[in-house]
Amino acid sequence: MKTLIDYKFANVLVVAAHMDDEALFCGGTLRRLRDQGCELSVVVTASVTVTNQPRDPLERIENESARQQRRLIAFGRACGMLDVQSTHLLETHNCRGSYREEPESNRILIESEITERLEPLLKSLLPDVIVTHGRQGEYGHGQHILTSRVVRRLWPGSLWGFSADGPLFVEIDLSFKKRLLDCYRYGTTQDPYWTPYTDIPSESSIGPWLGSTEPFREYT
């Protein structure tokens, strides 16, 4: 049986909740898959309107339209570094925080939206393998959990999720991943006011994805 990193010359689809999840949770692995001749595609389920970064630390009043545009540019830069062949933005509503704290009616609405927009896309792309969020949404993030639930329900084929505990740990080029994450700084990678993911303490909730390996679990 193939592990995720055994795929060569395959169509690999990442289904992520937000623009930056593709870089943070599997950017190093995508680089390896690309170098193995894989064709990469990325789907983002959540709307750009509520993404948190990048925000201008020097502006008292944020220009929301400009901030969203910066996010789109950052996403484009990251996908360009990975030679992503196609990107797809579902622009669904967002489950912002803890899944358990979201009203049930909101969870149902968002899950239905993701399903309605993702199902025909999966049928048209027909990837060899999908990479997406784990069952617990890495650190309990509602949109991660909902995205994972929908993908696992819709996709009968090879599926791998981000998993802090592995059991698959893919060795990556950490210097490349740092450059990839730099795409999501505000404005320029030289901005001294923006703290990149790689400056976050390793004991944080995203700590498992800040080192020289990226952990995954297969779903069947």
Image (cartoon, rainbow, N blue to C red):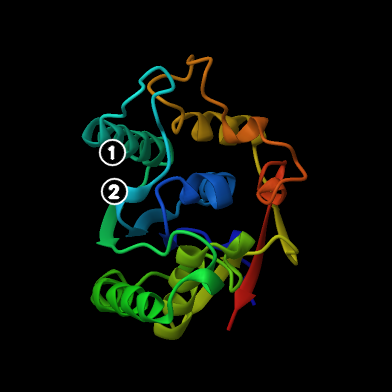
Find residue 79 and name its label.
Answer: none
Question: Residue flagged by tag 1: what amino acid is it?
Answer: Gln
Left or right of 102 in this view: 172: right
Residue at horizontal 46 percent and vertical 71 percent from the top: 102
Residue 176, visible in the rendered structure: yes
Find residue 49 and name its label.
Answer: 2
Up/down of 205 relative to 97, above or below: above
Mark positioned earlier in the residue sequence (2 or 1): 2
Quadrant of residue 167 within the rendered picture: bottom right
The residues tagged by marks 2 and 1 sit, at their Cα atoms, a distance apart of 6 Å
In this view of the protein, which residue sits in the foreground, 187 or 182? 187
Up/down of 147 relative to 17, above or below: below
Residue at horizontal 31 percent and vertical 29 percent from the top: 62
For mark 1, what is the residue? 68
Classify mark 2: helix, strand or loop: helix
Residue 131, visible in the rendered structure: no
In this view of the protein, which residue sits in the foreground, 175 or 110? 110
Left or right of 185 in this view: 140: right
Q: Are marks 2 and 1 in contact (CB under 8 Å)?
A: yes
In this view of the protein, which residue sits in the foreground, 215 or 19? 19
Residue at horizontal 39 percent and vertical 83 percent from the top: 154
Measured as percent of width and height from the top left, residue 81 is found at: 42, 35
